[in-house]
């Protein structure tokens, strides 16, 4: 087990059940490895661990970028046909990115698809500038919205989640944000469940390898930087019940997928109406410093371990019994440039991976 104790909001029987099937144990998690699973209908916490530790959200930041954008769409201030122009500032962002040229234009619909499937940092900045008028104004909107939602231990400095001092969140706050995304914007939930996108030049499968491979999976977002480890917010619905999971600081692509699948399964099969409301969960643990797991995640030994979780074809080897192989090709949704806009720039000689590993989408068993 991780060094911190598993906490559950129900009786000892649930703790024993969770421990027995190993939901809070990954193949090689960092010493701290925050996790949480909640019921989306009741907002009650099924189980949690290190839920109030401050953590770098990495690309889970884009969940708030989406929230602020959805709010602008719902108000009528913008539409899904609103052009999103790639500024020089946007195109200068580090990878993962699309390498669109300055002046290229997308519809907001295509930009959201790229933001949430490909997790492109250049498009995140372009969306922020379109919605906020400027990057700084959009970040201010993100922080104002976090405060309004009750995300008491969250602060943003950018719309994409690349490393930077002063950007942090918690498993508890990310669960709350995901819950409110579902409650406030049901009309936009399909963006989170896309299996892949097609720009007209290239197809990109969703980084969330549970889509199409975990029964009922319908979102939400993955993220990685060295300081955070491998993060994932998951969502799944079966028989009318939806649960949300948060995994922070996992050691690998496979590890975060396994942890997410196990948590979602536990949530979907747990008794209903158990636990306390998420907003009533009392803070605990060390909440002073932002945890940084760079030393354990980004070192040669850890990289070697991660390489050993892939098969000969480079596909991640996942071990959760609840993840299965897709029995058909992914469905790709169009997310390309507006006709007549600039063409995509060449990626030849560019480091597309940078500090964000790009997973192979299909697990093997």
Image: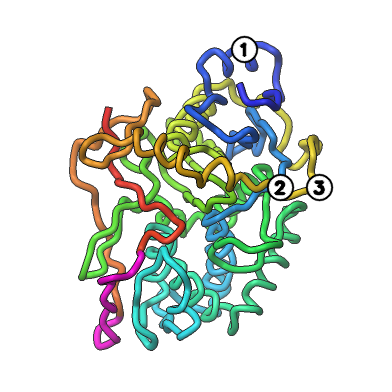
Residue 54, numbered label: 2
Instruction: Report which residue position mark 3 lands on.
Output: 288
The 10 Å Cα crowd at callout 1, few under 14, some 14 to 19, many 20 or more, is: few
Label 3 to label 1, Cα distance in Å?
30 Å
The segment highlighted magenta reads 338-351
Q: Nearer the viewer, mark 2 or mark 1?
A: 2
278 vs 225: above or below = above
Q: Secondary structure at mark 1?
A: helix
Q: Position of residue 72 (x, y in %)?
A: 56, 73
84 vs 19: above or below = below
Q: Tell me how the rendering is colored.
A: rainbow
Q: Position of residue 234 (x, y in %)?
A: 49, 42
Residue drawn 29% across and 86% down?
341
Residue drawn 50% across and 44% down?
299
Q: Position of residue 30 (x, y in %)?
A: 58, 35
User: Is residue 98 magenta-colored?
Assistant: no
Q: Secondary structure at mark 3?
A: loop
Label 2 to label 1, Cα distance in Å?
27 Å
Which badge, 3 or 1, comes first in the chain's sequence? 1
Residue sitting nearer the eye, 54 or 181: 54
Label 2 to label 3, Cα distance in Å?
8 Å
The 10 Å Cα crowd at callout 2, few under 14, some 14 to 19, many 20 or more, is: many
- Snapshot quadrant of residue 211: top left
């Amino acid at each position: 087990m991780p060094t911190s104790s598993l906490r559950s909001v129900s009786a000892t029987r649930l703790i024993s059940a969770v421990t027995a099937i190993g939901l809070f144990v990954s193949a090689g998690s960092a010493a701290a490895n925050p996790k949480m699973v909640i019921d989306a209908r009741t907002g009650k916490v099924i189980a949690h661990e290190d839920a109030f530790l401050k953590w770098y959200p990495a690309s889970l930041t884009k969940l708030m970028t989406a929230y602020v954008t959805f709010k602008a769409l719902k108000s009528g201030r913008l539409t899904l046909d609103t052009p999103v122009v790639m500024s020089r500032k946007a195109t200068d962002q580090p990878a993962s990115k699309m390498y669109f040229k300055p002046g290229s234009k997308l519809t907001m619909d295509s930009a959201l698809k790229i933001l949430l499937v490909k997790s492109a940092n250049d498009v995140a900045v372009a969306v922020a500038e379109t919605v906020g008028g400027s990057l700084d104004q959009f970040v201010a909107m993100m922080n104002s919205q976090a405060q309004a939602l009750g995300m008491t231990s969250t602060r943003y400095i950018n719309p994409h989640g690349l490393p930077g001092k002063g950007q942090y969140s918690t498993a508890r706050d990310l669960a709350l944000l995901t819950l409110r995304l579902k409650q406030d914007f049901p009309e936009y939930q399909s963006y989170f469940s896309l299996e892949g996108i097609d720009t007209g030049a290239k197809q990109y499968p969703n980084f969330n390898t549970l889509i199409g491979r975990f029964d009922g999976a319908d979102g939400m977002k993955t993220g990685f930087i060295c300081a955070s480890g491998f993060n994932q917010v998951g969502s799944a619905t079966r028989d009318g019940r939806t649960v949300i999971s948060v995994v922070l600081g996992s050691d690998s692509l496979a590890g975060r997928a396994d942890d997410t699948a196990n948590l979602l399964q536990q949530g979907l099969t747990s008794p209903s109406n158990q636990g306390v409301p998420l907003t009533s969960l009392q803070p605990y643990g060390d909440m002073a410093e932002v945890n940084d797991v760079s030393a354990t995640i980004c070192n040669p030994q850890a990289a070697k371990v991660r390489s050993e979780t892939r098969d000969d074809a480079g596909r991640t080897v996942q071990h959760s019994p609840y993840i299965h192989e897709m029995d058909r090709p992914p469905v790709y949704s169009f997310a390309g440039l507006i006709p007549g806009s600039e063409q995509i720039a060449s990626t030849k000689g560019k480091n597309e991976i940078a500090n964000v590993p790009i997973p192979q989408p299909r697990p093997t068993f």
